[in-house]
Each structure stands twice: as C-alpha cells, then as structure tokens.
Amino acid sequence: MTSQQFSTIARMLLLYSGLPLLIAFPTLLIGQIKVMSYNTHYCVGMNKENSLKDIAALIKQTAPDIVGLQEIGDSAMAAELGKLSDMYFVFGPSLGKMDGYGDAVLSKYPFVYDGNHSIPSASSSRYQAMSVTIDFSKKSSKLGKVRLINTHFDWLKTIGSKQARLATVDVIEEAFFQAAPIPTILTGDLNAQPASVELEKLKKYGWVDSGEPGTHKTIPSTQPAHQIDYILFRGKEDFAVKSFSVLYGVLSSDHLPVVAELTLLKK
C-alpha cells in the first residue's frame, strides 16, 4: 500500500469516527486523557455543609485520569480527597505552609512534582501555579509523559487584579517552559471570561481552550451565568479535543466542574 492510499484510508476512518479532519496524515492518534478541573470552594457546598465526600464521589464517578483542584483548605484535605477517590495527590500551598490553603492535583498514574510558584495578586489572597509531570505509560505503552499545570488567578474586578492575571501568564511561561517541551495541559479558575484580555494573552503563547467553540457557564453553580473555569492545552499539534462538558447541577461548590477528553497526537 502506498503512503497516499494509507492517507486516504486514514482520513476516511477519521471522518467515520467523527474526529476532526484537521488531524491529517501522518499524524496518528496515540491515546486519550480525561481531565477535570474543579474549584471546590474549600469543600463547602451550596447548602453550607461539608461536601468533601460528595466531591470525592463525583470524581470517582466521572473517572478522570488527572484532576486540577482549586481552593483546597490544606494538605490534609488534599490527602483525604486523594484517598477517597483512589488517586495519587499533591498539595500546592499558596501561603508556603501545608496547613494553609492552596490547590491540589490528583492523578490515577504516578507523577513527578515539578514545583509550585507564587503568582501575582492585587487582592489580600495569595495564589500559586503548581505543576506535575505524569507518566501515562501504565495506561498505554503509546502514551508518554504529560505535564499538568494547575492554578487559580487573582479574583478582583480591578485594574490591579487584571494586571496581576496578565502577569501570571508570563510567570507560568518562565516557570514551566524553560526546559525541554512536553505536551502540557493547564487547569484552573482563571477569574477571566473567554473573551477577556487574559485568555487572549494565553492564546498568543499557544494555549488552546478545550471548550471552544461553544458557550459554557461555570459560576455560580446554582444559576451559572458565565465561565471562569478552564481546561487549556498547549498546541494544536499535541492534542485534539474529543469532548468538553460542564457538569451542571452539581452543588458541592459555588463553581461547577469542567471535564475534557483530550486525544494525544503523535506525528
């Protein structure tokens, strides 16, 4: 069979399966990764009661490969969520201490903790961006290492907070993109809407919003009005989006969780 014939057959199979035709020969599909991002509101539900067990149960039911969690109370909360959801975990403290608030990453598969960097804030809150490198070879021999960056941007609707969010994009570049590049995913509460200058700056660096095209609303969870929670990936050459969804109706936080199924590509 000639390469031209193989290319034609590959395109027909992609069309039949519903995958986008932008995946052109000789690009091959090598595996899928299911990602969740969720601002847990420190595991306080809309009924003002502790929702930790409900959140862990939701994670188990959704069965993501990796999860970026924001607004985690402390390392003990991260550990309990990891235990109940049967996943590896790491806590990224915002205040530099394990008994203070921060964010967390959960993973079905082993990972290396790359580090945690403070990011700019014009509010009284402190934030950070954390990163892990997950080894997906146990899921599939074709899958290798993928980086996940998890973060929570400053939240005020002020010029100072907007500038802090814009500066955070540069911090992420300097902190995590100086070494040899690998396929990278970013989860987070970015406190910025899809048409914002913050999202536009991320896209200029090469980030792709896995929820586009489409309109998604993630906050408040009771009557969602706009989107500030995202799953981004770095480069159309590394990933294609199989699906993106908001888990509407979940009231375990003031935010709604978002889930993306990403197809990792190999050229």
Image (cartoon, rainbow, N blue to C red):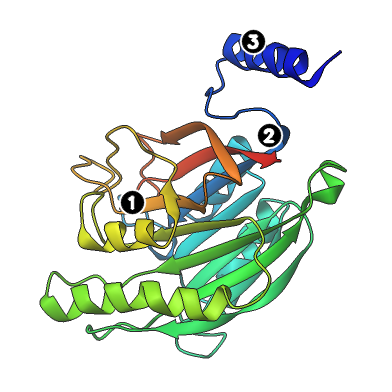
Residue 77 or residue 25, whichever sits in front: 25
Disc 3 residue type (three-letter): Met
Label 2 sits on residue: 27
Alpha carbons under labels 1 and 3: distance apart:
40 Å
Label 1 sits on residue: 255
| Percent position of residue 24, x then y | 61, 28
Q: Earlier in the sequence, mark 1 or mark 3?
A: 3
- Left or right, 148 with reference to 250: right
Tell me: residue 79, above or below residue 54.
below
- Left or right, 158 with reference to 92: left
Q: Which mark is residue 38?
A: none
Mark 2: few/some/many CA within 10 Å (<14, 14-19, 20+): some
| Percent position of residue 196, x then y | 21, 56
Tell me: residue 242, above or below residue 78.
above
Disc 2 residue type (three-letter): Thr
| Percent position of residue 258, x then y | 44, 43
Alpha carbons under labels 3 and 2: distance apart:
14 Å
Q: Residue at x 24, y 70 (%)?
A: 155
Label 3 sits on residue: 12
The quarter of the picture where residue 98 lies is bottom right
Alpha carbons under labels 2 and 1: distance apart:
36 Å
Disc 1 residue type (three-letter): His
